Each structure stands twice: as C-alpha cells, then as structure tokens.
Image (tube, rainbow, N blue to C red):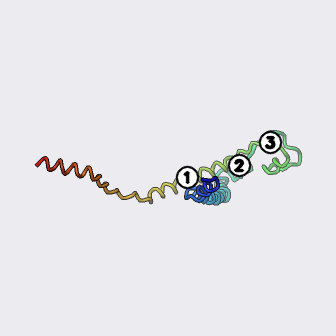
Amino acid sequence: MSFMSEFKEFAVKGNAMDLAVGVIIGAAFGKIVDSIVNDLIMPIVGAIFGGFDFSNKFIALKAVPEGVAMTLAEVKKAGVPVFAYGSFLTILLNFIILAFIVFVLVKQLNRLKKAPPPAAPAAPPEDIVLLREIRDSLKK
C-alpha cells in the first residue's frame, strides 16, 4: 500500500474526522466560555471583592518608568516584566468552568447512551451439538 493511499485511508476514517470536528467545536466553545468568564462572571466577582478588575492585577518586577499608566497593558508595553496574577486567575477560572461543562456534558452523554441489548447466546458449534446428542442417547 502506498504512502498516499495509507494517508487517505487514515484521513477519511471516522476517528480522524471526529477529532477534527471536535477541535473546531472546542475552539469555538472555548471562545464562548472565555466570554462568559470575562464578560459575565469576572465583573460579578470583581463587584463582590470591592469593585476591582482582576485582569489588571499584577506586580511589576522592575520599576515602572515615570508617565506610564499603571495598567497591565501599558506596563507590558513599556517593557517592564510583570507577575500578572489577575490574568492567571481569570484563565484558571476559565479552565475550571470549561472542565466542569465538559464533565457535565460527558456525564449526560453517558447517561443518554443506551446500553446495548444483551446478546443472545451464540449457538454451539455443530460438533458440540452432535456430542451432546450422543451423550444424551447413551444416558438412555
């Protein structure tokens, strides 16, 4: 079998196509979760903790030059290394929500998946049937 025909067989198999579809849907789903965290959850969490924005929480690891606004974007733009723990907390919350949603989704799919009906016992081979008939006739 040639390399190209093997690759074609692999690429059109259900598993490879399912994986590709899963990656595309996962990327889109990740954007939805990112929006939920940044636009809905983090403002509420910020309001609960005193009205501050987590995404702008950082510790500058060097002195910030005069005239630079103390926002994460501006400090990074000035070339100052930062310990951006607010961004990390936002991304961590993003991951936890995404992992929880995937867990619930998989759990529901497993619940909805019907167990296959029990298979009928396979008929014994013909030689076994003949041996049983001989055994039964000898018992008589």
Question: How many numbered marks appear?
Answer: 3
- Please tell me which residue lies in front, 17 or 107: 17
Element on which disc 3 rests: loop
Element on which disc 2 rests: helix
Dot 3: within a 10 Å radius of its alpha carbon, few (fewer than 14), some, or many (20 or more) residues? some
Residue 87 on image: x %, y %: 71, 49
- Please tell me which residue lies in front, 29 or 8: 8
Tag 1: amino acid = Phe
Q: Using the numbered discs, state the Cα–Cα distance from disc 3 to disc 2 in whole angstroms.
A: 14 Å
Task: Name the residue rendered at 48%, 54% in the picture.
Answer: 107
Nearer to us of marks 2 and 1 is 1
Element on which disc 1 rests: helix
Residue 23 on image: x %, y %: 62, 56
The answer to which of marks 3 and 2 sits earlier in the sequence is 3
Task: Name the residue rendered at 75%, 42% in the picture.
Answer: 83
- Please tell me which residue lies in front, 32 or 72: 32
Dot 2: within a 10 Å radius of its alpha carbon, few (fewer than 14), some, or many (20 or more) residues? some
The answer to which of marks 2 and 1 sits earlier in the sequence is 2
On residue 87, the disc is 2
Residue 22 position by quadrant: bottom right
Question: Which residue bears the numbered disc 1?
Answer: 100
- Please tell me which residue lies in front, 1 or 87: 1
Residue 109 on image: x %, y %: 48, 58
The answer to which of marks 1 and 3 sits earlier in the sequence is 3
Task: Name the residue rendered at 57%, 51% in the picture.
Answer: 99
Residue 90 on image: x %, y %: 67, 50
Tag 3: amino acid = Pro
Question: Which residue bears the numbered disc 3?
Answer: 81
